[in-house]
Amino acid sequence: MLTLGIGAAPQLEYFTDFKFVRHGIVATVLFLMALPLEATSLWGTMRRPRAPLLASAINFGLLPLVAWAAASLLGDEMRLGLYVAASTPSTLASASVWTRRAGGNDAIAIVVTVLTNLSCFLLTPMWLYFYTGQDVKTESLEFANMIVKLGVLVVLPMSLAQLLRRIWPKLADWATANKTPLGVLAQWGVLTMILLGSVQTGIRLREPDSQGILSNVVPMMLVVMGIHLTMLWAGLKLSDLAGLGRADRIAVALSGSQKTLMVGLQVGMELGFSILPIVTYHVGQLLADTMIADQYRARTSQLESAPDAPTAPVS
């Protein structure tokens, strides 16, 4: 999709003018992602809120600050795109999937997803204002405007999905049983957003001053992956200091360091910022966390096969 969008940007530019289509895709995708979430079963996790609150603080507190410090290594185009990536909430699907794969407490990952996504309509605009200051002057960066848009496009679809689950048990059972097909439909929506966002990037790359953008791609990739892996390590260490168990530490590390692609694409396209940092963050976290989760999965299997052995610390 990136190749198609950037390569055929002049031919596809017409389709990027239909904002209502893009907004409809975002709302639909987030509804489909939230519909299978069994949020009502997570209240037990919230009775011990240290782990989800710590992961949320890393995701929406420590990570944006580290990104702000690291952004000085990048040019303006990638710097602004990095700000968008850092300002988005935790991912809706992969955090819980990878946590479960690693032998962690996936209920914590889901709670972090819900907390960060439902609060992003306030926290994302706040961080973007902190980052940009007077550097970017656009109607899309007006605080009230961003709150309303993120509230309508992110919070409302997710809340509606959970409300329907509560009042319509048959729909809830159907959504739970069809989690994979719904996820596939949602991924097609994500791919469509990547296509539209890459068209904007392709148009920008064809402008006369685009040489600096291309020279910043590799440094951007290194910075993005450095931030993700640093936050994953910080999640392990901070949760260890907080006295959390092994399964909870894994959940804090993964959910606290991951970012959602869908909200990042919407915000980046709305502001006209590069989508390459958020796409790089998303792809990078999937590749890196797959290997990390598999290592923890193997270690968990060893611990389970030797129940009398002392529990090794997560490192």
Image: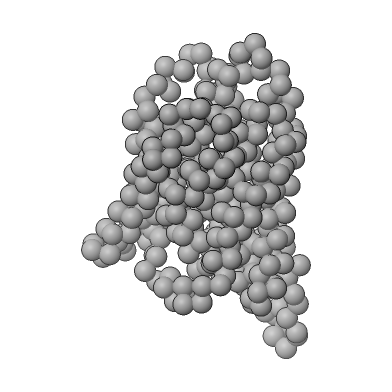
Which residue occupies the foreground of this view, 7 or 46? 46
Instruction: Left or right? Give the position of 312 relative to 246.
Output: right
The image quarter in which residue 289 lies = bottom right
Instruction: Left or right? Give the position of 18 relative to 241.
Output: left
The image quarter in which residue 177 lies = bottom left
Residue farthest left in this picture = 167
Examine the rendering and report whether any part of residue 142 can be seen: yes
* Coordinates of residue 50 in the picture (x, y in percent): 56, 72
Residue farthest top in this picture = 208
The image quarter in which residue 225 lies = top right
Q: Is residue 262 above or below residue 308?
A: above
Which residue occupies the foreground of this view, 193 or 43? 43
Residue at 72 percent across and 54 percent down: it is 230
Instruction: Left or right? Give the position of 73 relative to 84.
Output: right
Q: Is residue 203 above or below residue 270?
A: above
Instruction: Left or right? Give the position of 240 relative to 96.
Output: right
Residue at 50 percent across and 68 percent down: it is 107
* Coordinates of residue 129 in the picture (x, y in percent): 53, 40
